[in-house]
Image (cartoon, grey):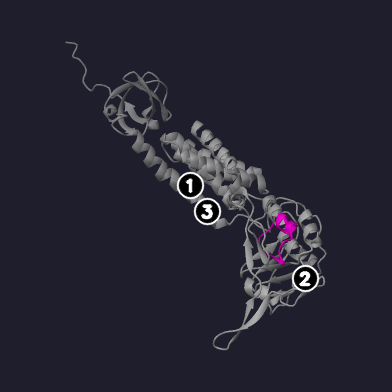
């Protein structure tokens, strides 16, 4: 456990030593700037978008949105910046299969022009921040209120919501379609027609397009703000910490465990988690460790599996905007179970069954029970105390003589010493 704490400290210090890695994007250049707003959003992402809008050095800002909503943060200042910006700001929700729910949809509706790819989904406009009580609409967009608790799929056949201006299957086609559009008295020039060598007339973008993403540190931390990701890093970190403790390794596993727990901590601090579900997940791993220490998988492992499944499936209170994917949770729990059954058992047994430890010679030796066995207890063999196990029917009490039958890792399997079948003839 000390290794885990030291490694966690090392990771935190490492993140502080390289502040350059946390630089959000890069300075804008003239032309069209596409800002990626994807995945579950948090305050770091909102700050990144706000800083981009505040610089106003582009001819056109394009928000490319694919987000199920906001986990935490305040978008009011960002919406104020968007609506007051002198630079035209438009939104494209895409590609096909993308979504814009909750606060992400309200960000899209606040821009000057909104397009979406066919097959995308929008809706669940309330609450603005997932897990909170509905707080009203921060944007005055016609038809937005009708999507407060439902979602719709964008398609030309079914018609578009009033605040969606157009459909475009790709970001390039969307930008090209903006050519000639007037926004606040400014006419956009985004495309031009050229004649190719074969005489074909083609439409190409007339401005250079730059794509911006959040900085490296933000992207790393945001790995854990999907509910199933935070759940995964939590149980993985705990399992690897146990592995390091039992296997007595060189510290690599402890470093990975520390990084996993660090990412999980960020997810727990960002997501609207149900804390009873977090406790159930932690308890599930502890039950696995309890059975592993007893060198058997029994009802505790079953209870641990139940705790992990329940905790994983109910990890966050963010429905209907986003929640844990059930199949991902099942795969994670299955992986943890296999880890304890095979990886932990194999590695620990191999490490503690080498000749340098030398436990094979104990088989056949006699010892004395130091406690009653029910069915586990302690036994003294050759002056050393060992953890032991026996059949319940053996009825071993403290002080009984026992024989070592087998060595399983660091546990001795014993049985009572059979009484002599021959008695001395008194004559």
Q: Is residue 15 above or below residue 117?
A: above
* Residue at position x 38%, y 40% in the image: 347
Q: Badge 3 is on which residue?
A: 330
Task: Name which of mark 3 and mark 2 comes first in the sequence.
Answer: 2
Q: Which mark is residue 163?
A: 2
Location of mark 1 (residue): 336
Q: Say which quadrant the C terminus sits in.
A: top left
Is disc 2 placed on a helix, strand or loop?
A: loop
Q: Is 147 on the left-hand or right-hand side of 229? A: right
Q: Height in image: 144 above or below 265?
A: below
- Per the image, is 263 magenta? no
Image coords of residue 336 (percent x, y): 48, 47
Q: CA distance from mark 2 to mark 1?
A: 46 Å
User: Quick check: 227 left or right of 421?
Assistant: right
Mark 3 or 1 closer to N-term?
A: 3
Left or right position of 102 against 384: right
* Whole-number angstrom distance, CA of label 3 to CA of label 1: 10 Å
Q: Say which of 203 and 50 sits in front.
A: 203
Span colored in magenta: 50-69
x%, y% of residue 29? 66, 62
| Camera-nearest label, 2 or 1 | 2
* Residue at the left extreme, as displayed: 427
């Amino acid at each position: 456990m000390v290794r885990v704490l030291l490694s966690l400290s090392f990771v935190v210090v490492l993140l502080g030593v390289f502040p350059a890695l946390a630089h959000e994007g890069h300075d804008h250049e003239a032309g069209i700037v596409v800002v990626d707003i994807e995945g579950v959003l948090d305050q770091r992402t909102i700050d990144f978008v706000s800083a981009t809008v505040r610089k106003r050095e582009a001819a056109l800002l394009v928000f490319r949105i694919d987000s199920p909503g906001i986990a935490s943060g305040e978008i009011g200042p960002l919406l104020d910046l968007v609506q007051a910006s002198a630079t035209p700001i438009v939104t494209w929700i895409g590609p096909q299969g993308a979504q814009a729910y909750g606060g992400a949809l309200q960000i899209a509706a606040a821009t000057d022009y909104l397009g979406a790819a066919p097959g995308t989904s929008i809706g669940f406009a309330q609450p603005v921040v997932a897990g909170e009580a509905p707080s009203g609409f921060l944007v005055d967009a016609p038809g937005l209120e009708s999507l407060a608790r439902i979602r719709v799929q964008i398609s030309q056949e079914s018609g578009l919501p009033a605040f969606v201006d157009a459909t475009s299957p790709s970001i390039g086609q969307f930008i090209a379609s903006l050519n000639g559009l007037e926004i606040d008295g400014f006419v956009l020039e985004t495309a031009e027609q050229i004649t190719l060598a074969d005489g074909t007339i083609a439409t190409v973008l007339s401005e250079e397009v730059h794509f911006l993403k959040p900085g490296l540190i933000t992207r790393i931390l945001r790995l854990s703000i999907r509910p199933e990701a935070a759940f995964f890093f939590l149980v993985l970190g705990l399992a690897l910490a146990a592995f390091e403790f039992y296997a007595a390794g060189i510290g690599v596993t402890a470093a990975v465990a520390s990084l996993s727990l660090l990412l999980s901590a960020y997810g727990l601090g960002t997501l609207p988690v149900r804390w009873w579900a977090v406790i159930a997940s932690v308890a599930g791993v502890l039950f696995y460790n309890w059975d592993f220490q007893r060198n058997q998988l029994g009802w505790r492992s079953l209870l641990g599996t139940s705790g992990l499944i329940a905790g994983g499936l109910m990890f966050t209170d963010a429905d209907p905007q986003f929640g844990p994917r059930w199949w991902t949770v099942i795969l994670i729990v299955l992986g943890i179970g296999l880890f304890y059954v095979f990886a932990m058992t194999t590695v620990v047994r191999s490490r503690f069954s080498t000749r340098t430890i030398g436990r094979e010679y104990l088989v056949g030796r006699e010892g004395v029970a130091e406690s009653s066995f029910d069915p586990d207890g302690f036994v003294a063999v050759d002056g050393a105390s060992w953890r032991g196990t026996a059949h319940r029917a053996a009825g071993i009490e403290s002080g009984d003589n026992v024989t070592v039958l087998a060595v399983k890792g660091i546990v001795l399997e014993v049985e009572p010493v059979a009484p002599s079948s021959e008695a001395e003839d008194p004559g």
